[in-house]
Amino acid sequence: MIRLTGVSKIFETGNQDITAVSEVSVSIPRGALTLLTGNNGSGKTTLMLLMAGILSPDAGRVYLDGMDISRLPERIRSRIRRNRTGIIFQERFFIRTAPVWQNLVLSLIPTERPMADIRNKGKALLRRFGLEEKENVRCGRLSGGEKQRLAIARALINDPDVIFADEPTTHLDHDVLQMLTREIQNWKTRGKTVVIATHQPELLNAAGPDIRLTLEKGRLAREER
């Protein structure tokens, strides 16, 4: 479902070019749970963002279901992300002064989905993640655990085929970590393709990963299946 061929990404910082990802080739089948592991600065997040079509590679190709998304215009990649993917960012990018409900459904507003469907889906997710009483609370007033649950709910609002998560276990308490593990197992059962960038892969062993990709200095150092 996701295939990368010779993918590289270089960032310019002042007078120096930094190669974040270098010549990575890998295939991830539909329905697989994949962990991108490695030390901080190894290129995990950059590789995940390349897979999601948020970044474009400087070399190589990124394919989603056989379609080369790496050379598509941003407006088309954005539409694909909105319709096909859910993303849990490490930085949650909430509008702090906006209520929970608005932050949850904002990504669906540009779609042609009826507002009644959006409301029903949003209400169900708020109940599922124990946030139904927080619907009208400003995001800046949520606890850390509540923000993490909202971030997961927001990624699921469009019922995505592919779910990306960047360091989702960082600063989680035990209860939220258990909830996340159950969610990941549920996604696998439903045939979702899941890619998680993490430097704490041991915390996700209970979720039953299918593939582990280890990066070192932007290169694929190890692949376990």
Image (cartoon, rainbow, N blue to C red):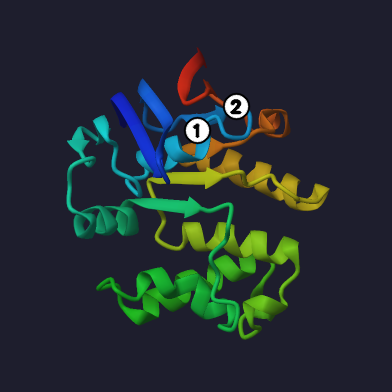
Along the line of sight, the residue nearer the viewer: 130 or 143 = 143
Q: Read off the residue under disc 2.
A: 38
Q: Which amino acid does label 1 sit on?
A: Gly
Visible residue check, residue 192: no
Q: Residue 170's spot in the image, x, y percent? A: 70, 46
Q: Is residue 194 left or right of residue 203?
A: left
Residue 98, image quadrant: bottom right
Instruction: Kindly give the residue lying farthest to the front in the view shown.
Output: 15
Which residue is depicted at the point 29% across and 72% down?
113
Asked if the residue under mark 2 is in contact with the one under mark 1, i.e. CB atoms within 8 Å, the reply is yes
Task: Examine the rendered structure and indicate whether residue 174 appears above or below residue 143.
Answer: above
Visible residue check, residue 44: yes
Q: Is residue 39 left or right of residue 189?
A: right
Q: Is residue 71 left or right of residue 193?
A: left
Q: In this view, does 118 lie to the left or right of 155?
A: left
Q: What residue type is labelled 2?
A: Gly
Along the line of sight, the residue nearer the viewer: 34 or 157 = 34
Q: Read off the residue under disc 1.
A: 43
Residue 1, image quadrant: top left
